[in-house]
Image: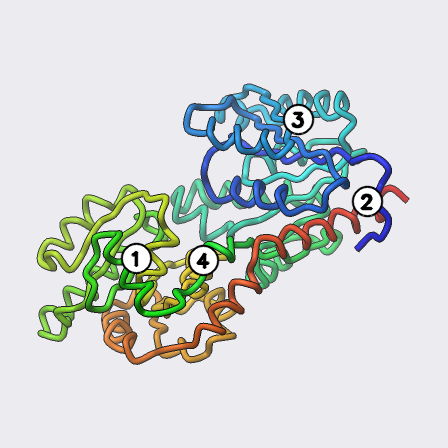
């Protein structure tokens, strides 16, 4: 940590595809909100044009003191002509006298990698590229994107990963000259906090029109192949066929995605015990009203929904991914709720075990503090200061 404030704020550019309400932009927003006052002048440079879905977030960022700059490319142009985009970005950075450049997501990483060494380049990796690209784009295109990203990151020299599992993956993929840091993404630990008493949880259930009695399990995330929501429904159907599905058990799906129709079809035999909420601005309320969170994901960089669930007082039924082991090491009792990736029978067994697993409120509060967004912002501040000392001596 630097002890003396600089005399004038240093320009800090966050390069993104577009401003829109999604994970990486929430991270950028929370970094900016938590940086020490007076050190930086933040800019958001979006390579594409602002669309209506991002206007509210753009207003929020401007109210925080960010200057927003649009370069106006299409995603197709960025894919085909990243060097052209880099030249325009270079002109923009020179105009605003910015040397510290922090990129987020695939195309911004590619474009910024073509900037000259006069800039201090930093990239945050939010996932395991090989797995995320393969599930999202297919094996062939996903492999191409992964190779292209690794070549770009090798030109960056500085990479931040959101977990130790993520760091270990990139450390193996990148040349030794690339420095790899860890800065976990953060949650709002004032919003995601366990109910103080049972009466508070009951009140939340009434407000959300949920059953006041019974055991509520919540799925929070996109209904996509990588997260495998179908497996959870197959597990419940298995329990129903075996006459083991408790009448008081309810499953909520928060989120939407291309698998929604298929999930609704699978849920029909389960009747009112499954509810599809869709997108909601009240995720914290739903988690605080729930007993458990469930995830069957096949790949994750740092699943904030799991951290938010624990911080809200939920036990976590989870697939056997290394990242869940990293997060849940502070609540080892949840090891009993771990099932093999893609295994519906083990998932069903864990669902039955969940009501017998508990942890105390203090453990939930500690998880919120450990992964708080203010702590994340200060970690980035330390990394920025370290890089400024390293390259501007």
Q: CA distance from mark 1 to mark 2?
A: 47 Å
- Mark 3 crowd level (few <14, some 14–19, many ≥20, 10 Å Cα): many
Q: Secondary structure at mark 4?
A: loop
Task: Name the residue at 60% across, 62% down.
Answer: 168
Task: Name the residue at 35% across, 66% down.
Answer: 341
Of the image marks 3 and 1, the number of the one nearer the N terminus: 3
In the rendered image, which residue does mark 2 sit on?
Answer: 388
Q: Position of residue 246 (x, y in %)?
A: 15, 72
Report if the CB atoms under discs 2 and 4 are less than 8 Å apart. Answer: no
Q: Nearer the viewer, residue 103 or 60?
A: 60
Q: Secondary structure at mark 2?
A: helix
Of the image marks 3 and 2, the number of the one nearer the N terminus: 3
Relative placement, left or right, of 305 versus 356 is right
Q: Secondary structure at mark 3?
A: helix
Q: Quadrant of the C terminus?
A: top right
In the rendered image, which residue does mark 4 sit on?
Answer: 192
Relative placement, left or right, of 147 versus 178 is left
Q: CA distance from mark 3 to mark 1?
A: 49 Å
Report if the CB atoms under discs 4 and 1 are less than 8 Å apart. Answer: no
- Mark 1 crowd level (few <14, some 14–19, many ≥20, 10 Å Cα): many
Report if the CB atoms under discs 1 and 2 are less than 8 Å apart. Answer: no
- Mark 4 crowd level (few <14, some 14–19, many ≥20, 10 Å Cα): many
- Mark 2 crowd level (few <14, some 14–19, many ≥20, 10 Å Cα): some
Q: Which mark is residue 204?
A: 1
Q: How is the image coloured?
A: rainbow
Q: Which mark is residue 86?
A: 3
Q: CA distance from mark 3 to mark 2?
A: 22 Å
Of the image marks 1 and 2, the number of the one nearer the N terminus: 1
């Amino acid at each position: 940590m630097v002890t003396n404030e600089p005399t004038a704020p240093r320009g800090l550019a966050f390069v993104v595809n577009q401003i829109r309400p999604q994970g990486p932009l929430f991270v950028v927003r929370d970094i900016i909100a938590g940086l020490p006052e007076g050190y930086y002048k933040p800019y958001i440079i979006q390579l594409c044009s602002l669309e209506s879905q991002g206007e509210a977030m753009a207003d929020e960022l401007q109210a925080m003191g960010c200057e927003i700059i649009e370069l106006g490319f299409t995603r197709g142009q960025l894919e085909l002509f990243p060097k052209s985009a880099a030249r325009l970005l270079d002109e923009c950075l020179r105009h605003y006298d910015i040397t510290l450049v922090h990129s987020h997501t695939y195309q911004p990483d590619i474009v910024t990698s073509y900037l000259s060494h006069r800039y201090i380049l930093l990239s945050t990796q939010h996932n395991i590229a090989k797995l995320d690209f393969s599930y999202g784009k297919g094996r062939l295109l996903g492999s191409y994107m992964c190779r292209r990203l690794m070549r770009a990151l090798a030109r960056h020299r500085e990479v931040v990963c959101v977990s130790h599992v993520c760091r270990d993956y990139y450390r193996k993929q990148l040349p030794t000259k690339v420095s790899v840091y860890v800065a976990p993404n953060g949650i709002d630990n004032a919003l995601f906090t366990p109910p103080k008493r049972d009466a508070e949880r009951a009140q939340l259930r009434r407000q959300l029109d949920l059953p006041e009695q019974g055991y509520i399990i919540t799925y929070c995330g996109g209904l996509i192949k990588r997260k495998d929501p179908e497996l959870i429904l197959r597990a419940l159907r298995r329990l129903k066929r075996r006459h083991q599905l408790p009448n008081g058990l309810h499953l909520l799906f928060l989120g939407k995605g291309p698998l929604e129709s298929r999930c609704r079809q699978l849920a029909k035999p389960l009747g009112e015990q499954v509810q599809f909420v869709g997108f909601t601005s009240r995720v914290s309320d739903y988690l605080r009203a729930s007993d458990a969170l469930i995830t069957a994901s096949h790949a994750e960089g740092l699943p904030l929904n799991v951290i938010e669930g624990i911080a809200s007082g939920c036990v976590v039924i989870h697939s056997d991914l290394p990242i869940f082991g990293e997060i849940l090491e502070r609540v080892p009792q949840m090891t009993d709720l771990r099932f093999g990736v893609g295994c519906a029978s083990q998932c069903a067994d864990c669902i039955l075990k969940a009501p017998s697993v508990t942890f105390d409120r203090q453990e939930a509060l500690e998880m919120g503090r450990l992964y708080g967004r203010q702590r994340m912002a200060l970690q980035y501040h330390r990394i920025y200061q370290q890089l400024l000392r390293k390259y501007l001596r």
